[in-house]
Amino acid sequence: MLRKILIANRGEIAVRVIRACAEMGIRSVAIYSEADRHSLHVKKADEAYSLGSDPLAGYLNVHNIVNLAVMTGCDAVHPGYGFLSENPELALTCARRGITFIGPNAEVIARMGDKTAARQAMQKAGVPVTPGSPGNLNSLDEALACAAEIGYPVMLKATSGGGGRGIRRCDDPAALRHNYERVISEATKAFGRAEVFLEKCVVNPKHIEVQVLADHHGHCIHLFERDCSIQRRNQKLIEIAPSPQLDDAQRQYVGGLAVLAARSVGYTNAGTVEFLLDSDGRFYFMEMNTRIQVEHTITETITGVDLVEEQIRVAAGLPLRYRQDQIQRRGFAIQFRVNAEDPKNNFLPSFGRISRYYAPGGPGVRTDGAIYTGYHVPPYYDSMLAKLIVWALEWDDVVSRGHRALRDMGVYGVKTTIPFYQEILRHPDFRAANFDTGFLESHPELLNYSTKRRREDIASALAAAIAAHAGL
């Protein structure tokens, strides 16, 4: 087994990996910028090392990170998600320096990170993909010709895109002309590559993704699906496992497609295969994420499998501990991304000091976060503060539990998405498990929630103020 792991990330995912290391008897090494000096992952790790004053550059410097791993005696690097997690250079540099990269190899990361190459690989494997350009577009004229052939609306996408960036829907030729240079510019700024491609837009689909695990001994399994249809501008907000909108036949079919996709590219470690499900019940491959996902928590909750521990075991060369028929699902789980944003103000980020923080508890409640009372939320990173996960045996019960846990959760000093999520859970269509990726756009009234503070919130604020004044 591995003895010491450097976590090339920050925030809640770094804390998540640190906890897995602690349970496995592995020493953990954190890295941090000056803006993160007082972050929870720095406090939790066995060792922590500064990356310097720049809030971003250190987290993105492949060679410095690997050098630090070597200097501190680490035998592995865990990339988390975001930052360098899907950068093949990190995996390649680790291999050259004799450091284990906890993820797939550099070739697979590069292949699946290139969306046109990934589409071609899936077509060859027999996995259905949406109609689109055969490769990257060379000009606006080629884009217009391709769109005319497959029919509008179309999606113009950055080839190296991710996280909902570098994507524009085009409903007609005028929109395609307007967005072509914009997407190229976004792709260049965000991903360092100007390549874009085109595919048919599946209007208001359901966004279904499947968690897979594969080892170096030829074993590959899926751990059922997650429904990520509640999203805003291609950014996921609420995730559910398993999807309450699929039947068992669909579940078995899409799980099999995901395993086929992973096997066809020689995938190892944890990964996620993402699909769109149209109104006629057809699944289309969208992309593969070659890393742990933000929403891995709900898969862990319904299966009992610790995905981060399995990542580490696979990277160490051990075989999977589970066969496909041993993976059982139980109940439903929902994850809420608690972001420091103001939904009523176009989701404007809300940074500053967290004056008070209360994590919810009770049966079937889990919180993954990196915040605490007094923590200053820096303005340089993703706005996610914590992930609230709830579980129950029945769909109606997990929705009710989610509403209760959101009500119990207290984050003060910054605006959050908590009241917006409470409003979503009240909606009869969500309660009836009837939603798609257009749900939030079709229900703008969800933003009309009340901002009045509850009586118990006011009472606790007064008590905290009195205690602070009295020096208690």
Image (cartoon, rainbow, N blue to C red):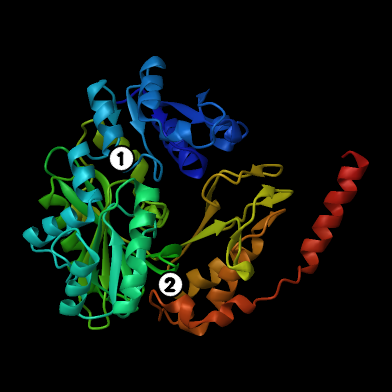
- Dot 2 crowding, Cα within 10 Å, few <14, some 14–19, many 20+: few
**Three-letter residue code for mark 2:** Glu
The residue beneath circle 1 is: 87
Figure quadrant of residue 328: bottom left
x 24%, y 37%: residue: 314
x 21%, y 31%: residue: 317
Distance in Å between CA atoms under marks 1 and 2: 39 Å
The N terminus - image quarter: top left
Q: Secondary structure at mark 2?
A: loop
Q: Position of residue 356 (x, y in %)?
A: 73, 50
Q: Are marks 1 and 2 in contact (CB under 8 Å)?
A: no
x 86%, y 50%: residue: 465
In this rendering, the answer to whether 14 lies above or below 46 is below
Say left or right for 384 vs 242.
Answer: right
Q: Position of residue 331 (x, y in %)?
A: 39, 66
221 or 92: nearer the viewer: 92
**Three-letter residue code for mark 1:** Asn
The residue beneath circle 2 is: 394
